Structure formats: C-alpha cells, structure tokens
C-alpha cells in the first residue's frame, strides 16, 4: 500500500494514509497544487460525513456497478488525485467490469500525463488511454476538452471520480451515463451525475468493484441489472448525503 | 491586492482570490503542501458556512479585540497560510492593538522562516519575531515548541490563526489567553481557545481590527473591555458555528 509508518490503531489512520498518498503524488509529479487543495476540501466533507460509506452511497455504488456491467463501452477517467489515491483499485475496477482507463487532466501537461500513465502501469494497468487526445468534449475550452476518440469520446458509461463541474456538465450533455464520485453532494459534478456516489474515493472505488463482482457471481440478468439502474434515485441519494453531512454522526 | 484577473462579479470571487493567494504563497516558498490541504479543508467549511461572518463569529472578534486592548504583551502568531492570505491585514491588526508579530511554523525551516519574514516586511511589518527561537512551549516536540522568549514565550495574549491542535493545546496550558481563528468549530484548536473565531481568516483579521478601532474610538474603559471579555461564551459560540455549518445557509 504505502511505506509510511502510521499505526493502524491511530483514530485517523485512513485519513493520514490518504493524505500521505496525495503528498507522494506531488513528489511523483502526479498531483497538482489544485489537487492538494481539492484533497483538503474532501477531507473536510469526509470528516463531517463521519469518514464512512453511508447507506445511500453504498446503493449508488451498486447502481454504478449495474451500469458498468450493462455498458457497451465503459471508461474510467483518472486524474492526478485519483491516480495518487487509488491506482491499484482503479485497475481492479477496470478489470472487474471490462472498462478502459483514460487519463484526463484539468491541468494537462505532457509531463503529468506521462507520469500518471506510468504510475497506473506500475499498479498493473495494461493499456492506458488519454495520450492520443484526438477527440473533443463539445462545449468546453479546447485544452479542457481533449479526450481519446476511442476512449471517453465513444464511451456510453463514464466513471469520473473527482471531476470538475464544467466537464462533468459537458460530459452529461453528451448523453453519456455519468458516474461521479464526489464528497460534496452540493457540487455541480454530483448534481449533474446520472449516479452520484458521495463517498471517499478510496472507499467508493473498491466498493463498486465488490458490487460488480457480487452481481456477476450471483448471475444477475440484464433485466435485474436494469431494474437496479432504474430504481436508483440520484436526487434522493444526494439529499440523504447532504442530511448525513449536516446531521453529523447520526444515521441518515 | 493581487494581480489575478477574476471579475469581482464572479459568484466565488473571494474564494478564488483566496485560493490564488495561497498558490502565490507556494511560489514564494511561504506555503507548504500541508498548507494547501489545510486551505482546502477551510474552503469546504467556509462553503458550508455560507462564506460569511456569522453573528457569533462577529461577537468573538469583538471579544478578541477587547482581550488584545487589555493585554500587557499581545503577540500575533503567523504561519505560512496566514502570511500568504492576509499579510497586510496582520500588520494592520498589530498596529491597531500594539501587538508583536511572530512567525511560528509547524514545518519550520530557515528558508521558509526568512521568506515569511520578508513577505511580512514587504507588507509593512517593522519588527518580526520568530527567528531567535530561544524559548520553548512546554509539553510538545522540540522542533514544534520553538518560540521567541521575548515574543510568544512571554505573551499574555496570543492570536494563533489556523494553529495546529497540539500547539494550541500546549499554549493554552501555559495560561495564556488564546485567540484562535479556525473554520472548523470541532477542531481541537477551536475547542481549547479562550476565544474561538469560526470565520475565514481573510474576514476575521480585519474584523478584529475594526472592533479594536471602534472600541478605542468610543473610549471604552478597562471595565467595559473586561465586561466584553467576561460576557463572551466560547462554548455557545462554537455551538452556534456548528449549527450554522450543519444548517446551511439559514441563520444560526
């Protein structure tokens, strides 16, 4: 996992480990300054949430798994913080649902792109898309719009953890099923998502994988997966998350 | 103020300007990585607070001003984020209440100490303490404990904006009046403060200055200042702040 020495008994073990990974990401040229600030915002929301996966986030992760299993061409979008925080978990999710992985940066530089691709390969990724950048997301700035035409460009389901609001909105407008992981239920990314998962990415990504494996192992049919998809209520999930954050350590 | 071009009409003008100042702080060697993450945590709490000074924070700022006017030897402790976010405002507060300014870093390096001292001087500070480091705060780690004997070491009232919990606790144990600015009312620093001000530092510091000037201009007597100090209820202020954060944009 990581070479930092934090006793697992420490009450803030996971939070400190997560922060350590983000700082390592800076050393490796993966995480940006904006990424560090975003990490801090996430920490605050997670703290208010009680640093746990609330029931509505677990349901959202299950709906996300169903969408991914139903997809023709699912793609997982990875930015600097995602790569720093859970590279191995992203690779496992991609394998579990047969998805492509595409690096997609808000502050795109060739150097960071390559550092992230290498980091994902070090964690077991085979093919990593994003370097071709021959496609565009309509409606946003040229630099921000770059995607691979045979990756996010032609995906029917995209997982965009920790995505910026403008791009989340533009991707949604392309009629893709959008699965967002974001600790702020009031953020634009969470609001525009088909499936918003209000949870820490280090808990959410393995949780989607676990649900996908469970559904597959149980032999869930297309109809059953479609029922899970249809029954998921994004607005109710966002409301539940906001209530959990506002109410503190109580149940939703 | 700053050379970034953000239209003042932008709904998140102040938040973006603040973030820009923190990033400039990194360029100048003033702000640390931990400081960037802390900035993000603050942004999230401020967002939930409605990015405004709530009435209980205004009362706390008034109590802080009264404490500072009553003090024999008030000192304002400045770390990397404080220096990056409101250097001029710190210098004005120090002048208004005749306080010393002392640089006091959690991650202390000579280079950062000097960069911050220079930055404060560029913003009008005369004398800046912190480089002597011939005093110690009892009960914490050697490196973290360094202070100037004739600065924080002998202060009766200290303003410690954005202070780490361990040091806030240790300073409190030294029987100093401790004025903390922190956007998280549940943080240890806020909990141990004599006067916790749950507000963004870019609003809180000028607000303390304004209250100090008002009280002085109104010719407040020692008795009147002592009444303000005694009537301030830290626990009630923290409760009100937590309610405001949990309740969202409604009044306290």
Image (spheres, coloured by chain):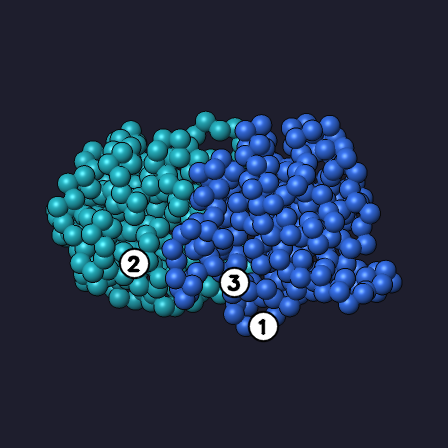
Chain colours: A blue, B cyan
* Nearer-the-camera pick, B216 or B176: B176
> Which residue position holds label 3?
A51
Task: Name the mark on residue A251.
Answer: 1
Q: Are marks 3 and 2 in contact (CB under 8 Å)?
A: no
> Left or right: where does residue B25 sit relative to residue A227?
left
Residue at 77% x, 58% y: name it.
A66
Q: Position of residue A172 (x, y in %)?
A: 75, 44
- Give the distance between the C-alpha atoms of the residues marked 1 and 3, in whole angstroms: 13 Å
Q: Position of residue B207 (x, y in %)?
A: 36, 48
> Callout 3: helix, strand or loop?
loop
Q: Residue furthest bottom?
A: A251
* Nearer-the-camera pick, B59 or A244: A244
- Give the distance between the C-alpha atoms of the residues marked 3 and 2, in whole angstroms: 22 Å
* Circle nearer the N terminus (1, 3): 3
> Callout 1: helix, strand or loop?
loop
Looking at the picture, does residue B53 appear above or below residue B111?
A: below
Residue at 19% x, 55% y: name it.
B137
Q: Choose top left, top right, bottom left or bottom right for residue A213.
A: bottom right
> Which residue position holds label 2?
B166
Disc 2 sits on a residue from what chain?
A: B
Q: Residue furthest right?
A: A223
């Amino acid at each position: 996992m990581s070479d930092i020495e934090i006793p697992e008994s420490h009450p803030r073990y996971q939070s400190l480990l997560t922060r350590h990974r983000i700082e390592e990401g800076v050393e490796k040229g993966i995480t940006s300054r904006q990424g560090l600030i975003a990490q801090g915002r996430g920490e605050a929301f997670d703290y208010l949430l009680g640093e746990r996966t609330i029931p509505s986030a677990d349901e959202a992760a299950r709906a996300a798994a169903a969408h991914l299993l139903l997809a023709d061409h699912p793609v997982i979008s990875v930015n600097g913080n995602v790569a720093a925080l859970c590279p191995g978990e992203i690779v496992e999710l991609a394998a579990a649902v047969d998805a492509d992985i595409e690096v997609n940066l808000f502050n795109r530089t060739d150097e960071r792109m390559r550092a992230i691709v290498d980091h994902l390969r070090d964690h077991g990724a085979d093919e990593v898309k994003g370097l071709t950048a021959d496609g565009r997301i309509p409606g946003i700035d040229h630099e921000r719009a770059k995607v691979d035409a045979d990756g996010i460009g032609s995906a029917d389901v995209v997982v965009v953890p920790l995505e910026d609001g403008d791009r989340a909105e533009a991707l949604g407008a392309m009629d893709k099923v959008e699965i967002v992981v974001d600790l702020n239920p009031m953020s634009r990314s969470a609001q525009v998502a088909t499936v918003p998962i209000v949870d820490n990415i280090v808990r959410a990504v393995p949780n989607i994988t676990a649900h996908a494996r469970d559904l597959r192992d149980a032999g869930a049919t297309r109809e059953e997966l479609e029922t899970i998809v249809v029954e998921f209520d994004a607005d109710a999930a966002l409301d539940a998350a906001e209530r959990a954050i506002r109410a503190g350590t109580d149940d939703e």
